[in-house]
Structures are given as structure tokens and as C-alpha cells.
Amino acid sequence: MDERTAVTPDAAGLKALGHPVRLRMLGLLRIEGPATATGLATRLGLNTGATSYHLRQLAQHGFIEEDEERGNARDRWWRAAHQSTYTGGASAADPEEAEAHDAYSQALAVFYGEQLHNAVSERMSLPADWLATTTMSDWNLKLTPAKAKALLEALFELIEDVDEEAGADGVGDYVVQLATFPRPGTIQ
């Protein structure tokens, strides 16, 4: 993964992303492109002061950056610094890292759930060719940690290889949510 494409945040970055509003803002900047605090506030139903605060937190941790090619002295435009966030497993030896990872994961689970709920609500109104691209599937596999890691790496490589260029004919926004984990309560 090149650094413009993906970021692997440290504990402080995970803590900053553990706020649902910041996750939504970062998602909008990644998907819809640069925006101002005012534009994001309107989109998210927030006041501009709160939006500006959250944007500063995202910028402080390197998730977003000022888009200096846009705006003027009054309007500051922001853009995503990376297209995706990658998190590995948290270290149980570092309680601060583990706590930040848990907070981020909890916020992300809510965010993913909302996205999935919205997708299911809109599913039947999709054109037939896009309807055929949707799935909610799961697999319960028997794997060693090494084999599980190899599977993740193969999935990441595949996903990065199939990304089309924005604006190409027939290209639409397509979400892949990947959650991999040992089945709860089964591994000691």
C-alpha cells in the first residue's frame, strides 16, 4: 500500500478516529472530494464550530489536509490525505493502543452498520446490472494465524488491483466492507 492510498494510524490517530462524526467526515472527504467546514456542517446537520473542531482533529493526526488550490482567506477547503485506513491487530501489551483500537472498532462497527442498512434499504431500486453486484455473504473457515494473514493480504491486493479510474465510462461508487475476526468465544 503506498502512503497516499492507505494509512495505518497509531494509537493517537485511532483515538481521533474513534468519534463517529470524524469517521463520517473522513468518509465524505474520501468519497465526495474536498469540502469546507460549512459544506460538511450542512451535509451532517452540525454547526460549523463543531465541524471545524473535528476537522482540526483529523488534520492534526494526518487524515486530512488543507486543499490549498481551492478557496480563499475566508473559506478553507479540506481533502482526505489517504483513500483508506488500515488497522492491524492491537497490541495487548500496550493498554493505550488496545483501548484506542477498541474505541475505533466500536465506532467503525456502528458506521459500517449504518452504511449497510442504507444499502439494503436502497438495494431493490438499483439497476439490474448493479443489483447483481451486491452480496451479504460470510464464510466460517478453519485457519491458522499465518493462513488468515495470507488471506487478508491476498484480499487487500485484489481490492487494490480492481479499482477503476474515477470518471471512466460506467464506473460507480462501490463499497467493500471487510471485517475479519476469530469467531467470538472460540480462541483462547
Image (cartoon, rainbow, N blue to C red):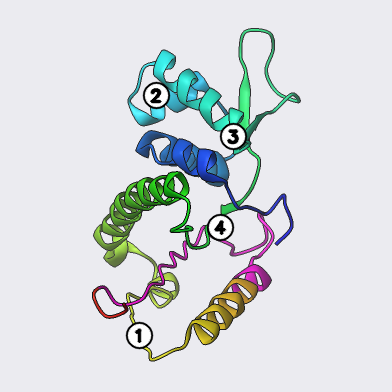
Judged by depth in the image, the label closer to the viewer, 1 or 4, is 4
Looking at the rendered structure, the secondary structure element under dot 3 is: loop
The answer to whether mark 2 and mark 1 are in CB contact below 8 A is: no
**Magenta span: chief secondary structure:** loop
The reply, left or right, for residue 58 in relation to residue 23 is: right
- CA gap, disc 2 and disc 4: 29 Å
Q: Mark 3 points at which residue?
A: 61
Q: Earlier in the sequence, mark 2 or mark 1?
A: 2
Q: How crowded is mark 4: few (under 14 residues within 10 Å), some or many (20 or more)?
A: few
Q: Mark 4 points at which residue?
A: 86
Name the residue: 32% across, 26% down: 45
Q: In which quarter of the image is residue 131?
A: bottom left
| Crowd rating for badge 2 (residues with CA inside 10 Å; few <14, some 14–19, many 20+) | few
**Amino acid bearing label 3:** His
Which dot, 1 or 3, sits closer to the camera? 3
Q: Magenta stretch: residue 181 in it? A: yes
Question: Image height check: is 55 above or below 145?
Answer: above
Give the number of marks.
4
Q: How far apart are marks 4 and 3 (CA)?
A: 15 Å
Q: In which quarter of the image is the C terminus?
A: bottom left
Q: What stretch is highlighted in magenta?
A: 159-184
Neighbor class of circle 3 (other Cα within 10 Å; few <14, some 14-19, many 20+) is: some
Q: What residue type is labelled 4?
A: Tyr
**Which of the two labelled residues, at mark 1 and mark 3, occupies the earlier sequence position?**
3
Q: Mark 2 points at which residue?
A: 42
Looking at the rendered structure, the secondary structure element under dot 2 is helix
* Residue 44 x/y as whole percent: 37, 30
Mark seen at residue 139: 1
**Is residue 185 located in the magenta-colored stretch of the structure?**
no
